[in-house]
Image (tube, rainbow, N blue to C red):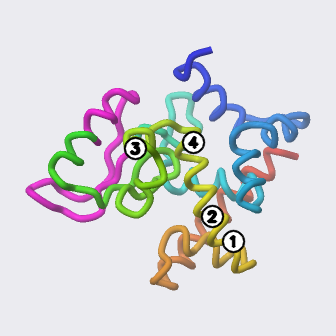
Amino acid sequence: MNIKKIVPLILTLSISVNAHSNSVLDNSVWGVAASYAGINVATLYGIAVQESGMRWRDGSFRPWPWTLNINKSKKGIKAGPRRYANKEAAEQALKALIEEGIRNVDVGIMQVNLYWHGNKVSNELDLLDPKTNINVAASYLKVLRAQNDIRKTVADYHAPTNAVRGNSYVNHVKRFEKIINEKLK
């Protein structure tokens, strides 16, 4: 099965679940990555929804893997999020940003920051692969989780030096996590 078919399937399984799908979610890339990070799978998915969530044509609100967010305007390129129709378009855009020397870019489904985490992949464009992106995020969350405080872990994922922003972020993620957990029941 090719990646264009797998990604929507994984994303759909993650949010459109029934009473028997908890094991499906736990055994998906989300569950494996969450287990590695030492966090609840709904927390990991809630972070993804907060980071790259958008309304899909079917009316659901889910993460979008072809998302880039430029954190600071530079060289005439405005800061802000950008969503691309497919992986190829997102790769072209990311490649152009890298060529311009713009590296403070959040990439993909978990919005992994290129500047801070680009060295965790052999090719920076690999951060647009959803599974790779989720696994890099899980590795970072595992490091943060060493503090053994899930609220701080989630806050630090977004804003490690700004407690106010971090706490606001946690509240958004927890809201999504609650919705996901209700769907898992």
Horizontally, residue 174 falls left or right of residue 119, namely right
Horizontally, residue 74 falls left or right of residue 27, namely left
Which residue is label 2 attached to? 141
Which residue is label 4 attached to? 62
Query: Residue drawn 54% across and 75% down?
Result: 168
Q: Determine the secondary structure under disc 1.
A: helix
Image x and y of residue 101, in percent: 18, 54
Query: Residue drawn 79% across and 45% down?
Result: 183
Q: Residues at badges 2 and 1 in contact (C-beta under 8 Å)? A: yes
- Residue type at mark 4 is Arg
Q: Which residues are magenta?
A: 67-94
- Residue type at mark 1 is Arg
Image x and y of residue 26, in percent: 81, 43
Q: Nearer the viewer, mark 3 or mark 1?
A: 1
Q: Which residue occupies the extreme front position in the image?
A: 122
Q: Tag on residue 145? A: 1
